[in-house]
Image (spheres, helix red, strand yellow):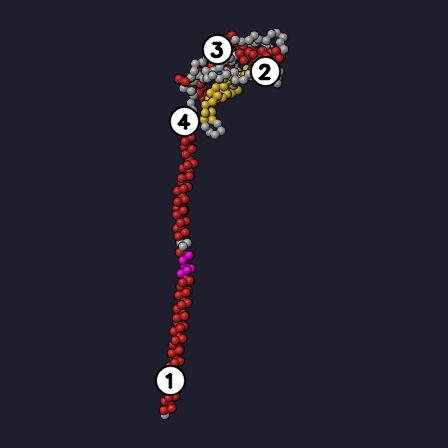
Amino acid sequence: MHRLERTIQVRDMRLTIALVFTIAAALLVGCSGDTSTDEEDARALAVAAPTSTPDAEPAAEATSVATAPAAATAEPTQAAEPVATQAMEPEPVDTPAAAIAPVPTVVIVIPEGCAPGASTDEQKDRLKAIAAAMFPGITNKERRRLQFDPEARDHRQGGIWIVAEFNGDELETIVMRKAALDRQMRDTYDALFNSGCDELSQVDLTGIQEAVTTREIGNSVVTPVVVFKTRLTRTVADGVDWANKEELDFNDIWNELLINPRWRKELLEAESAP
């Protein structure tokens, strides 16, 4: 009986020990599972941390995008400044009357004309000398009145062709300047076609004055330019009443090759004025 009880006690003790080991093993397994969970949580946080950092980058991008229109707005303003400045820039005007110098007094001495039977070369030299004598000295702006030495060319249809360019005096109005050019051209045509040089067939005269002009960069300036150019042929000159030239309007006689557009506009306005 005692032996049986001892046997039962030993078996119960073994079951108890086995149960303790079982519970301990379970506890160890539970602890091991918690550790893996903590590690996974730590990894999750580590992965989430970089994600939180880029969150600041979109904010920075949004800021740069938000400020971009302001910069873009500033650039057109800077580009528009030269246009506005140019639009407000006053257009150059003719020299004020108070600044115009008096016209120098000159005495024109016309050389003798061609001798009868003079050769073509002799006639060319004589005609060039006459043309040069018609534009002596300097203008009231201290420019040489004769722009270039006159040229004597051979006309394609025969005869001598004289070409001369000269600077006019800067007077108060365009009407006065044009009238002065008319007189200088008229007297020069008279001297040349009545010089006895029978081979003269055509004369071209070009007047140069200060005028408003626009350069390639777009700025308007006042500078000497060709403003009036005329031509007279022997055929027309032979029909002119030179003795009464003061009474004639040579704009109806010579061939007008060129006139400055601004001059033309002002002259037409002056003619139509009451």
Residue drawn at 60 percent across, 17 percent down = 153
Circle 2 packing at 10 Å, graded few (<14), some (14-19), many (20+), is many
Which mark, residue 106?
Answer: 3
> Mark 1 sits on what residue?
12
Q: Secondary structure at mark 4?
A: loop
Q: Nearer the viewer, mark 1 or mark 4?
A: 1
25, above or below 53, in the image:
below
Q: Earlier in the sequence, mark 1 or mark 4?
A: 1
Q: CA distance from mark 1 to mark 4?
A: 121 Å
> Mark 2 sits on what residue?
152
Q: Position of residue 214 (x, y in %)?
A: 47, 26
Quadrant of image for the N terminus? bottom left
Does residue 251 appear anywhere in the picture? no
Circle 3 packing at 10 Å, graded few (<14), some (14-19), many (20+), is few
Indicate the quadrant where residue 23 lies: bottom left
Which mark, residue 259?
Answer: none
Indicate the quadrant where residue 97 lies: top left
Callout 3 touching callout 4 (CB < 8 Å): no
Q: CA distance from mark 1 to mark 3?
A: 154 Å
| 33 in magenta | no
Magenta residue span: 45-50
At label 3, which amino acid type do we have? Val
